[in-house]
Amino acid sequence: MQLTIITDLNKCVGCKSCQVSCKEHNTSGDFGPVPDHHPYREVDGMWWNRVISMEAGEYPNVGVMYLPKACMHCYDAPCVPVCPTGASYKREDNGVVLVDYDTCIGCQLCMWACPYGVREFDEEQGVVKKCTMCIDRIEDETLPANDRQPACVQSCPTHARTFGDLDDPDSVVSHLVAERQGFTLLPELGARPAVHYLPRRQVTGMVGEDEISRVLGEDC
Amino acid sequence: MALTKDAEPSGQGRQALKLAEGTRKVHTTCYMCACRCGIEVTVEDEKIRFISGIAESPVNKGVWCAKGGAGIMTQYSPARLTTPLMRVPGSERGQGTLVPVDWETALNTVAGWLQDIRQTDPAKLAYFTGRDQMQAFNGYWARQFGTPNWAAHGGFCSVNMAAAGMYSVGGSFWEFGWPDLEEARWFMMLGVAEDHPSNPLKLAISRLKDRGGRFVVVNPVRSGYGALADEWVPIHPGTDGALLMAMMHVLHQEGLYDREFLSRYTNAAGLVEVAPGQPSDGLFWRSSGQDVMVADERGDFVPMMEASGRGRLEGDYRHEGRAYRPAFQLLSDRLAACTPAWAEGITHVPRRTIVRLALEMGTTAMKHPVVLPTPWTDFYGQEHPQTVGRPVAFHAMRGLAAHTNGFQTIRALFDLMMMLGTIDGPGGFRYKSPYPKEAPPPVTPASRPEDYQPMQAVAKPLLGYPRSPDDLLVQGDEPMRIDEAYSWKYPLAAHGLIQNVVRNAFDKRPYGIDTLMVYMSNIAWNSSWNTLETRDMLRAKDDQGEYRIPHVVVLDAFDSETVAFADIVFPDTTYLERWDAASLQDRPISEPDGPADSIRQPVVAPPSGVRPAADTLIELANRLRLPGFVDQDRPRYRTYADFIQLWETSPGSGVGLLAGYRGSQGTDTLVGAPNPRQLEAYARHKAFWFEEIAPERKYYRMANRQYLDWAHGVKFIPTADPIILQFYSEPLQTFRLAGQGLWPGKKPRHPALRKRLATYFDPLPFWHPPLEEKEETAGSYPLILLTQRPMTHYHSWGSHNAWLRQLLLENPLFINPQAAQALDLCDGQWVWMESRQGRMTATLRFSDAVEPGTVWTWNAIAKAPGAWGLHPDAPESQNAILVNHIVPDTLTSDDDTVTFNNDPVTGQAGWYDAKVRLYPSELHEVWPKVEARAPVRADMAEWKSLRYSTRKGAGH
């Protein structure tokens, strides 16, 4: 089993619901807190999921894109082998990459190794923290079924995010990746991220140029 | 009332799950913006553990946004006010030198001021509220007090959208109607900020995307929802009306419009008299029964109802020496000149794009209808075996509204929607209960001087929809309200004009006031324009050294910039600490499929020195013995919770703030006796109520016989009469006649006022340049300055939230690189941005996602140093800019008084009309600056680390 989150970039409006629901759950969760320095001054806080805004092209042919970025839960996670204490590990049963705070010594080698820059250091606690795929929600049997998914997936107001098992060829996430040309970030680095994104799908109009010319009384 | 703990839902196949000791889940309604989503709040050891969406909520269907989830940090804001405050005697307003006082002192002081006012001249109280969600209560309170001077913030926000919709179709966008993206195939969104509204529109766009619908965004800026558009149409601000007129031109030329819809359900076939210079000019020919007359297919003149929708749309007619033309013919004549080439010159949208979009929408509407297998019957008695819709939907907001031509632009949008036949059909614009209402809704404001007398309540509502000049609040040319709403300058000011209040109170025009009471409106900062002068006016004194506005009272939960200008402050609770209602009598949260409302309930206890603002207002009302609040000197309501449950629109009406669980047993809906345990019933049902409208009543509700009968029965509408859509707005023509001196009733004397009415009160839509363009200096300021609200902040409310502020705490000025290079300016450069109001500094950020004639930035990120509990060195004070400083609040006047920079029809603030020029700045910092003051919680402002956790032993 390899748990994953798929984000449909054709639906992401960049609202940062996922960014906040992640922090909201996890700061009081098993792997919290998710701290903030100088919260009411020059604030600098920890976020396990950050939404990146991008702009590409030249006016008027410009695209605007939003991309939520958190741990990719890679099949060949580069953060795991570099850890001198084994604190960074990948769960064999579900593929989730986690940090054991009891054995983490805060050396931050994993942060250097991660190609995606999604690990953050808690100076006060002396440990590295990151997205856990809300493992404490997924595995909490006292929660209602609908709550046993990552907070960022549950909150997403456009339902752009889907949670599931990428190793199961019949899962919704596997179908989405196959049918919608799902892709990963920086595949050339060979980490084989589990987290995938679905590209934009443009719906084009049906009016021809000659039709427009006819209406305007212009020659084609 | 005790804190109510939610019962687990039963009978829904969900097993009751055991919660950990000290943990509970409470259902309530969000208040992090105006959407009012249903939220489930998990509380652990009396601290907020988690806020999530309620899956069954009709508003948000289980999702929640960044603001909603971050409500935790608003609850623990450093800006919380925890006790009543009073300005230190002898200190100056604006410095924020406030000291705690006990409640009795604060209440006695304000009650004393109000008692004097009420005994002498109730108009000397001006009570204005911000983004409050209890306008039904606040309006009732002001009415019982007896002042005309009450309104919420709509004049500064979006009254053009509300009023133009109400006068056209008896509904409008957002709370009053909605694009049906469950069925639409083609969706155009015009002038919508990033997040307006939030979750409901996100859910809807998601559905459109699932179904492969085409999404076109018309906006000077591409961001947020616009990022997902299949096509971005960059348009020059303030010109959307020209685009809409040109698209109608193409639809008309190509015959791609719904003639049957226009004839049957709108007054487009109505015969308008053509008699220039006569009092009957531009008015409908009416039957003895007051029905609009039409020419039927044989050319006979018959009342519209008798013609059964077969009235002709074109032609010239004469009868008994009088000339008539159908309203549609009049618009057709006008459209002839509104060619795509004409619009290209105004909008900067290529003519080929205009034609293509018009053909797309027209073809989709007329050639690809959506058909539902639902029979319905119209008001002519004709049975329709199916429900056929035209699947072209629109959504629009302040990009259209916040211009001084906004009313007529939005009229154009609604006429375009009527041409496409896409009003309340599947896939089009759909009403939300209790709408549709008659267009305009049959409520007029109390307009006689004798309505506002000492020691009496006002017999009629304070706000409404004038039908003719006779409904205005004027005495001769003089306004009766301090904000000049319903005056000759701003006749259809249906939401009041909060932006006019401070200057007029300062000028004592039309009269001086005694007390300005403000509920959660930030009038000393981002809820004003020309901010610095506004702040000066709030603290200005007369020759005797007395404040020109003698008393300022503020009710708010947080230490906004405005709190520093108060003489007395009443601290309000947060939304997680009180009983509250999202009511059908207010801005409803209904869905197109049926009426809905919801409550808030206390999730955690407020600090001991804090009371809900509504409870404070009820306490003041009881002390003043306001009619409607006391019964033979005994208070009817002790708290707002009492009011929510017991108040009725009129004694015995059975209609109150909440529509669910009415009657003594809590089994009635919509109409029923007050239920003193109604809030408990809501609390047991996840804090909301929703009732789906029967399928055969769901569509074409303005014309749906079964719906109209039902809606009349549940008191949504006063009669079951057909609601005829107003393609042609005859009420507007009555104002034009007044401007021409031809109206038999009230009319203005001053030539400038007359000209204003004659010019802008056109009964058919038209485009004119924003009034700013007429300023002598307009040519010196070539760029339009816009702001928009980001998805993470609801105006000024995000910045005191430790999590949200991290998502946005500085706001550069976005500019198109081509435009910047033409001015020899570079990315990141400090510039002066100058308007005719003044100048300020800004840093540039290049963006290709903005059209070259526009510069823009985020709204309300900047904070006065020390306000909102932030450290005075916070980036919001040091690096963020408030463009309100240079947005002009007035226009060069044609008469001897002040003319605000408002739409001439509704008075909507034209704050998207500001024109600026840019040039390099030698100063590399934010300017202007206002004086710093100490944050309310200096210790929190200095916090080095926040490790929020509700776990025992974790975090701090």
Image (spheres, rainbow, N blue to C red):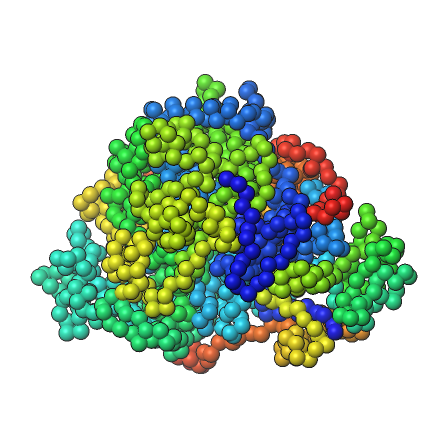
Q: Residue at x 55, y 53 (%)?
A: B7
Instruction: Indicate the position of residue B289 as horizontal and vertical percent values.
Output: 15, 57
Kindly identify the residue that appears in the image at 19 percent across and 47 percent down.
B742
B125 or B840: nearer the viewer: B125
Q: Quadrant of residue B155?
A: top left
Side of B787 relative to B376 (left or right): right
Question: Can I make out residue B595 in this image?
Answer: yes
Q: Residue B362 occupies which quadrant of the picture?
A: bottom left
Instruction: Depth check: give the residue in front, B84 or B227.
Output: B84
Q: In this orientation, does residue B879 appear? A: no
* Residue found farthest to the right: A84
* Residue at the (54%, 46%) spot, across then down: B4
Image side of residue B328 versus residue B900, left or right? left
Count the marks: 0
Task: Where is residue A176? Give x, y as percent.
Answer: 63, 76
- Is B387 above or below relative to B812? below
Quadrant of res B525: top right
- The residue most toward the left is B320
Q: Quadrant of the C terminus of chain B?
A: top right
Closer-to-camera residue (B269/B914)? B269
In the picture, measured across the screen, residue A57 lies left or right of residue B400, that is right
Position of residue A39 measured from the top left corner of the image (x, y, whole percent): 70, 44
> Residue B676 appears at what percent x and percent y?
42, 43
Q: Residue at x 78, y 71 (%)?
A: A93
